[in-house]
Image (cartoon, rainbow, N blue to C red):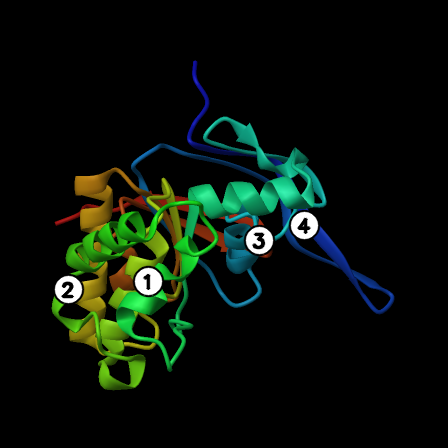
Amino acid sequence: MSLSFIQCRGLTKSYQKGNTTVTPLENLDLDVSKGHFLALMGPSGSGKTTLLNLIAGIDSPTSGDLHIGGTSIAQLSRGALTDWRARHVGYIFQLYHLVPILSAFENVELPLLLSQGSRSARRQRVERALELVGLQDRASHRPPELSGGQEQRVAIARAIVADPPLLVADEPTGDLDRESAQQILTLLRSLVADHGKTIVMVTHDPKAASAADETLHLEKGRLVTAQSLATV
């Protein structure tokens, strides 16, 4: 049987805080299929963001194994992990992290500037990403000229511009009003259904979680329940 797109086995993350060992994630097993939309829920300190950062290659586990797309990223060197992350992962933040003095186009283009592609190829990629999020007519606008929902869509365009197979989202609707949040969730679902992306999303909002294919609940670093949710 082939590996799942994301496969965690015995995944543990610990660190020292003074004389105390803190273990936000302990001996976790998880499988996520390609083209799946997974929501992670749980109280603060349950290990959700720790797991998200491990899957994104932002942090490394203390022990255990983590395969994504057949690559054991827990075994990669720091440099190899940075290269892998640039090609395979798009990160969507709660607070957008856009550069306020740059236009929407320039913000989306940022991940491509270190690549060896031509300027015209970069332009095509950026225009396509902005089109996918419905903001091609706002390409020249800077973040202060956009609504919160539009800023998050620019951030999503930036996350997908290099066409990574995996998107990780940390409370992507947490700073938005309900209507804008629903637009973002609809966009995320379309990225899964129409473009084959795999999404792992951390959220405290049951409404946001209901947009996913499945919700996993964590408690004190352990998986405690799993509930498949119907999607509309």
Seen at 59% across and 57% down, the residue is 220
Tell which circle, 4 or 1, labels the residue nearer the N-terminal end. Answer: 4
| Circle 1: element type | helix
- Please name the amino acid that badge 2 sits on: Gln
212 vs 111, nearest the viewer: 111
Give the mark nearest the N terminus, 3 or 4: 4
Name the amino acid, label 1: Val
Residue occupied by mark 4: 13
Q: CA distance from mark 4 to mark 2?
A: 41 Å
Q: Secondary structure at mark 4?
A: strand
Q: Which residue is mark 3?
A: 58
Residue 36 in percent (x, y) is at 31, 39
- Check the image and report above or below for 57 versus 111: above
The location of residue 150, given as percent across then percent down, is 22, 73
Badge 3: few (under 14), some or many (20 or more) residues near its Cα, within 10 Å? some
Gap in angstroms between the C-alphas marked 1 and 2: 11 Å
Location of residue 92 by image quarter: bottom left
Would residue 40 be seen by someone viewing this image from the given angle? no
Q: Which residue is mark 1?
A: 108
Which residue carries the number 2 mark?
136
Q: Is residue 3 above or below residue 214?
A: above
Disc nearest the viewer among 3 and 2? 2
Mark 1 vs 2, N-terminal side: 1
Assign a secondary structure to mark 2: helix
The amino acid marked with disc number 4 is Lys
Q: Quadrant of residue 136?
A: bottom left
Residue sitting at the far right: 19
Please tell me which residue lies in front, 130 or 15: 130
Say which mark, if any, is on residue 87.
Answer: none
Looking at the image, which residue sits at the far bottom?
Answer: 144
When the figure is inspected, residue 194 is found, relative to residue 173, above or below; the finding is above
